[in-house]
Amino acid sequence: MVIVEAELPSGFVVNAEVLNRLKSTLPILKRIETKNADTVAVFYFDHLSSEPVTFKIDGFREHIVENQKPASILVYDYYDDALSAREFYSLPVKMEVDA
């Protein structure tokens, strides 16, 4: 089993309604859940091959956060944690200030 944990940047939460639709578009996706107050999406696959798997995680900004740190995406084999990879990413977020 392969698990993908996608953390959203600080201040963002997962759009659970869109996540639920993913299961019907990706047959290899077995289960989806969120954790940490919907700031992390967790995807469960029975297996992955060498073929790329691409999907979109929809979210929305719930809070404005200054000095955001990069978020991470972790991919690992449930049965062998030596098989894992983590990548960090940042979103260009424009700060809105009321004058």
Image (tube, rainbow, N blue to C red):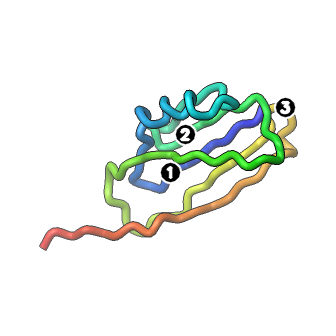
Secondary element under disc 3, as helix, strand or loop, is loop
Q: For the residue marked with disc 2, what is the amino acid?
A: Ala
Q: Along the polypeptide, which appears first: circle 3 or circle 2?
A: 2
Determine contact: label 1, label 2, CB under 8 Å.
Answer: yes
Q: Which residue is drawn at 15% across and 69% down?
A: 98
Q: Nearer the viewer, residue 34 or 65?
A: 34
Q: Along the polypeptide, which appears first: circle 3 or circle 1?
A: 1
Q: Which of 58 and 5 is in front in this view?
A: 58
Secondary element under disc 2, as helix, strand or loop, is strand
Q: Which residue is the site of mark 3?
A: 79
Quadrant that contains the N terminus = top right
Left or right: where does residue 90 sit relative to residue 77?
A: left
Residue 8 picture location, percent across and down: 50, 51
Determine contact: label 3, label 2, CB under 8 Å.
Answer: no
Left or right: where does residue 20 sit relative to residue 43?
A: left
Quadrant that contains the C terminus = bottom left
Q: Along the polypeptide, which appears first: circle 1 or circle 2?
A: 1
Residue 61 picture location, percent across and down: 35, 52
Q: Which residue is the site of mark 2?
A: 41
- How packed mark 3 is, by other alpha carbons closer than 10 Å (few <14, some 14-19, many 20 or more), is few
Secondary element under disc 1, as helix, strand or loop, is loop
Residue 52 picture location, percent across and down: 73, 49
Q: Which residue is drawn at 78% across and 47% down?
A: 51
Q: Which residue is drawn at 32% across and 49% down?
A: 62
Determine contact: label 3, label 1, CB under 8 Å.
Answer: no
Based on the displayed image, in which of its 4 quarters is residue 64 positioned?
bottom left
Based on the displayed image, in which of its 4 quarters is residue 96 positioned?
bottom left
Based on the displayed image, in which of its 4 quarters is residue 23 positioned?
top right
- Name the mark on residue 30: none
Q: Which residue is the site of mark 1?
A: 8
Q: How far apart are marks 3 and 2 (CA)?
A: 20 Å
